[in-house]
Image (cartoon, helix red, strand yellow):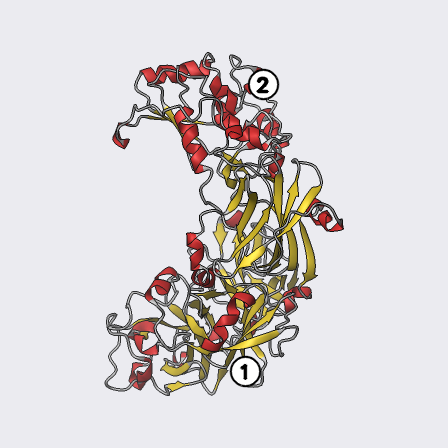
Amino acid sequence: MRNPFLGFWRRCGAALALLALTLLAACGGGSSSYNSGGSALAVGDSTDLKVVLNAVPAAGGGGGGGSSTVRLYYNRADNDYAGWTVYVYNAPGEALGGWPGKGPDGEQAGAGKYWDIPVGGASFNFIIVKDGGGTREPSNWSGANNDQQQFWALSGGNTIYKVAGDATNYASNPAGAPTPDIDTVRVHYKRFDGQYTNWGVHIWASSGLDTSRLDPGVVIDQWTNAVAFSQFPNYATGSGEIVFDIPVLNPQGDAARTALEFIIHGKPPGGNENDKDGRNDNIRVSYAALTINNKVGEVWLIQGDPTVYTAFPDSRLASTTDARAYWLNGSLIQYPKIDNGGVFKLYHSATGQIRAAKDSAVTGADGSITLDVFGGTVPADAALRFKYVPAGVVLQVKAGDRAQLPTLLKSQLVLVQENAGGEVQNATTAQLAGALDELYAAAAGVNDLGVRPTNAGTTFKLWAPTAQKVSVAVYDNGIGLTTALLPATFDAATGVWSASAGGDLSGRYYRYVVEVFVRGTGLVRQLVTDPYSISLSADSRRSYIGDLGSAALKPAGWDSHAAPAKVQAQTDMVIYELHVRDFSANDFSVSAKNRGKYLAFTESGSNGMRHLQALSDAGLTDVHLLPVFDLATVPESGCVSVATGGSPNGSQQQAAVDAVKDSDCFNWGYDPLHYNAPEGSYASSAGDGARRIVEFRPPARSRTRPAAPTPRPRT
């Protein structure tokens, strides 16, 4: 009889050799001789898989501001504060604890209860709730998603006043405040893309607008024909912004006039009238929240930001640890939400020592290159690939500097916008994928990544274009000390590191020793397995050296077996899904040593195999396995099974599962660690890299009928 899984195992043997993962990146050099001995080998024996060789400066090298405390007042006319809490997030984090936050810290006469909120950034969000969120105070923030979340920028001060039932966030106590004396709202509007002509204002007579003070030719309340900014009084262009005035009806004549509402949206033909520039609702300007001078109150609006700022917002952010910019290709960088003013530089440090604090000069860099503001059209392929990136300045590496990029990409790189005095205005790092894909496009032709043992020698190849140094630590077995350390050489065309040793090292194990800059950490030396591993030692600690085509990794009859020809077309498939461990873990007709293992499928007389055969006789053609690649979270060398007990409606079963949830043998299989290697917990010996493969390929001597179903793995 033919084994129903044999055709599948053969296909899996080939699939294990495919590409799947990529790792860090690299550069460097060295010899390819096979050295054994010497104190240098100790690096391969380290129990610390990540050693920081040069740490970045404290606080990530100069970030986005210090901490402060904001006091939030909440005033209820009924004086009933029972059950009311404040939940804070993005402060950063949950500054007042998890949902639904905490009760008030104190009370002040005339202002109500208050909370003191620790804030580490330039803004934060909060929600005022009762009964765990069942009741919420309203919000007028247009970025809220029907959950009444509220927003506060510290540019508006360190004190917030809220009144029950009032959506406005006040910077001063509104209790007893006089009626505002205002007849003009001055709007400052900043667009990073500078495309102001494609946008306009939708406004209507009942919005609070004083129509008598508009120019006679201005037509309002036409959705498809927004009012151009330039049609409003006192329109002017400023530094990275436009400014215009909206005349409003003074509340002094009617105290019911408390706010102005309008919408900024796209203006055809260049803009989409249904695009409200990141806002879900109208822009609402509450007069009581404004600072009014000579009957003029000012607000600041920013492209894509739903917040109505009542004081100038310092939206600058200088960080060496975030990655807000994107390499679009090998020469262009897009910096979202940044205009094209000032000077842009790309600073580099091989050891990660850059500091970039706002309003200070950059320190700690090895050097820099100055970038040009790109005035052309982004190539169509890059524009399509990075269409999700928000608008912002596009920068270009000068032609004379592009030859440096492969070297610079191995270092810490910080993109900085400076003023004329060389002071940091904004700083970030850029995500590298676009640059790496273009600079190392030749890597697509490399088809032998991983390990290749032959009689003539054993070669190791790793795609790692940002690493500064790579070596290969070789071991005689899965637990012994390093027996050789092979320096790898870097191919500048492909980004591939290569090392070689004389002779066939099949049956041994290896790891890569990679020195690479890690953002936010520094220059680190990491011991890593090969993303192209075909097998591993226990708990995936070391990669296995072997050739899937060698006789040592094939069960008897492997090459001569033919897959069943039961399915002529995909539409003929009848599929049954199963999990390798579940198939036999509790099947007492399977020998104890093979329960939950690959070898359970070789026991043709077991209940499970007889059941599969019966299904095949009834028309089943394929068995679809839940993932069988190397899993990240099953402890292969010591997993445990859940010991359940107790009444069916009791809590004992859940408690038993929770007790071993981090060491349980079970896993659905959707957390691949090594996509090309078989899972070790299903093998009879997880520590034997060869056995994983051989048992994953069932021996031809255990066969069922030729019409048996063909197993296929789920990936």
Residue that carries the numbered disc 2 in the rendered image: 593
Q: Is residue 181 visible?
A: no
Of residues 463 and 106, the one nearer the viewer is 463
Give percent across and percent down for residue 5: 42, 24
State the SS at label 1. Answer: loop
Q: In this rendering, is residue 370 above or below 116? A: below
Mark 1–mark 2 contact, CB under 8 Å?
Answer: no
Amino acid type shown at disc 1: Asn
How many numbered marks have been drawn onto this rendered protein structure? Answer: 2
The quarter in which the C terminus is drawn is top left
Q: Residue type at mark 2: give it.
A: Lys
Q: Nearer the viewer, residue 464 or 607?
A: 464
Residue 389 visible in this rendered orientation of the protein: yes
Assess disc 2: are there few (<14), some (14-19) or many (≥20) residues with their C-alpha within 10 Å of its C-alpha: few
Position of 687 relative to 395 (above/below): above
Across and down, in percent, residue 282 comes to 37, 67
Q: Residue furthest front?
A: 456
**Would residue 73 be found to the left or right of residue 442 on screen?**
right
In the picture, which quadrant includes the N terminus?
top left
- Front residue (pair 209, 608): 608
Q: Which residue is mark 1?
A: 419
Q: Along the horizontal axis of the image, is 467 left or right of 613?
A: right
Which secondary structure lies at badge 2?
A: helix
Q: Pinpoint residue 503: horizontal percent, then vertical percent.
A: 59, 41
Q: In which quadrant of the rendered view does residue 376 lie?
A: bottom left
Horizontally, is 254 left or right of 52 in the view?
A: left
Residue 468, position as x, y percentages in the image: 60, 60
Vertically, is 75 above or below 606? below
**Residue at position x 28%, y 68% in the image:** 273
> As drawn, which residue projects farthest toward the right?
39
Real-space Cα separation, disc 1 to disc 2, in angstroms: 71 Å
The quadrant in which residue 703 appears is top left
